[in-house]
Image (spheres, helix red, strand yellow):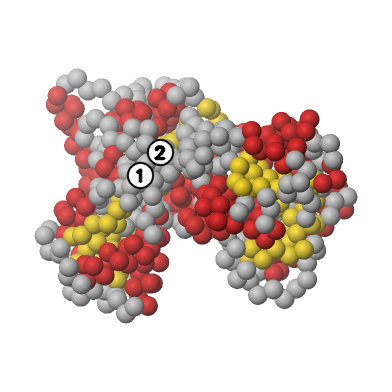
Amino acid sequence: MAKVLMKGNEAMALAAIKAGADAFYGYPITPQNELPEYMSKHMKEHGRVFLQSESEVAAINMIYGAAGAGARVITSSSSPGIALKQEGISYMAGAELPAVIVNVMRGGPGLGGIQPSQGDYKQITRGGGNGDYYLYSLAPESLQEAVDLIKESFDIADYFRNPVMIAVDGLIGQMMEPVDFELETPKWDLPKKTWATDGNQKGRDKNIINSLYLDPNDLEKHDLKLKKKYDEMKRDHQRYELINMDKADIAIVAFGSTARVCRTSIQLLEEEGINCGMIRPITIYPFPSKAFDEIPKSVKDLLVVEMNTGQMIDDVKIVNEGKLPIHFYGRSGGIVPEAEEIVEKVKEIMGGE
Amino acid sequence: MKRITIIAGHYGSGKSEICTNLAFKHKVDYIVDLDIINPYFRTRSLHQEFEDAGIHLVESTIKKKLSSDLPYISGESAIPFLNKELTAIYDLGGTENGGRVLIQFSDKIDHFEDIDLLYVVNIFRMETNTVAKIVKSIKNLENEAQLKVTGLINNTNLLKETTEEMIKEGETILTSVAKELDLPIVYTVIHESLDQQKDYSGKVIRLKRLIADKFL
């Protein structure tokens, strides 16, 4: 299949179908509705399950059940809906269940608005629900990248037996771009799901899907087992892109749609003779600390740009270890920063004012 | 262009961009945004530009709340059907669901001669990439809208990756659709940045992406 023109939400839905998603459970919310709508039309054609549940809470618990039975499952929602799903997500991490969760972020807190935002950064990267757990979280900046990462994310979820979050904002969900669905994506080496509760006809030991450990020693052992997975994510599976960093005097740190805007800012700055680079986290959990080890000596300042009031700054501070001054520029409430605003901010920093 | 032009098509086919381009070009009296499906990239996002051009924008009853997600349509949307002095462009929501809102005007339409219902097709949208799929989606729209489609718009594009060969490929498919349904290809859309060398069926619209460029 050659390239087709897709809306982000449709493209992510089709990518999940291509990745072999067995079931989708979800509840409508703007700006991600085209994703379940696409699933409602097309999952059946492939002999898969689409179910609109009565609430987000029901949807995530259906995801828990189907994942426990060994199915490849996906749900999607937008910020307030993802907040509702946190209990189920924490239970899934606790019960070691794989799933792909797409968050097409909108403005918050509370009901917020329906325009694009990156306001769930902390919720996504700090777990979100209760207990010691994290989600492997991918933040694509284009539809092609979103498609490729979703195709791979089902493998990642199965590999870690942990939910994977696809963190995009409303703009990625709603915009249109040409996409190729047949590009090769990495295939992970996956063991059989011998743990699944898929019917015990051969008399093997009972499989139990559970996150309840009443004995503190058992629970601590379990927490440490989970921690090993998160340590492996941090050690071996950070993803990031370095853009124009070779001779950069200043480096932007931005992900998702914001990184797209910053690419334009970098071009505009180049026309004015200013060398600006960018570190683009593709995984926001694990945060790509390794990218910061590659910052050349020429870089004198870091500028974090986000569609929120400054949620990623803490992660940048942790990995920067006090080496470079960190600045921030953000828009929130559903406003997408314009390339020129970021250009002005960079010039202000470089001017030393 | 007829006194009233209604633009329909699958979502993401390019309806709103075509509507706004036609509205500014022909300086119509009314532009009516009937899209209650899409939350972003809507015709109404150009409210200031329409006001400056003296074009009356009809949108939700709650005006200029661009971020509202409520399916209201102002009663003003019926005015061009009643006042025969006015010219208007109607922008529908995507797919046949978007056409359903037209039923409310059916008792107000007496002169079908002044009304065009044009169907926009981009063959790079998977739902409209074959003659059979396009014919089916046009019939679905007609059933929902209770109006006959009167013409086709070839908006075949892959955004910045569009070539004239692609547009011609769209024209070949649409020519078959046109023959099957006995419809003309009224317009062919070519982005203003593409260097046009070939001739096309219908009038050529050199498109500016007014709505998307405002966002991106």
Residue B184 position within the rendered picture, expressed as x and y whole percent measured from the top left: 84, 55
- The residue identified by callout 2 is A113
Q: Residue furthest bottom?
A: A273
Residue B123 position within the rendered picture, expressed as x and y whole percent measured from the top left: 69, 55
Any part of residue A290 in sight: no
Identified at 28% across, 35% down, the residue is A128
Marks 1 and 2 close (CB-CB < 8 Å): yes
Residue A187 vs residue B128: left or right? left
Residue B28 position within the rendered picture, expressed as x and y whole percent measured from the top left: 69, 53
Q: How many marks?
A: 2
Q: Residue furthest top?
A: A214
Q: Amino acid at mark 1?
A: Gly
Residue B88 vs residue B113: left or right? left
- What is the spatial separation of the Cα atoms under label 1 and label 2, in whole angstroms? 7 Å
Identified at 31% across, 24% down, the residue is A210
- Most foreground residue, A283 or A212: A283
Q: Are marks 1 and 2 on the same chain?
A: yes
Identified at 29% across, 76% down, the residue is A274
Per the image, label 1 sits on a secondary structure element best described as loop
Any mark on residue A333, and which? Answer: 1
Viewport quadrant of the N terminus of chain B: bottom right
Label whose residue precedes the other's in the sequence (1 or 2): 2
Any mark on residue A167, and which? Answer: none
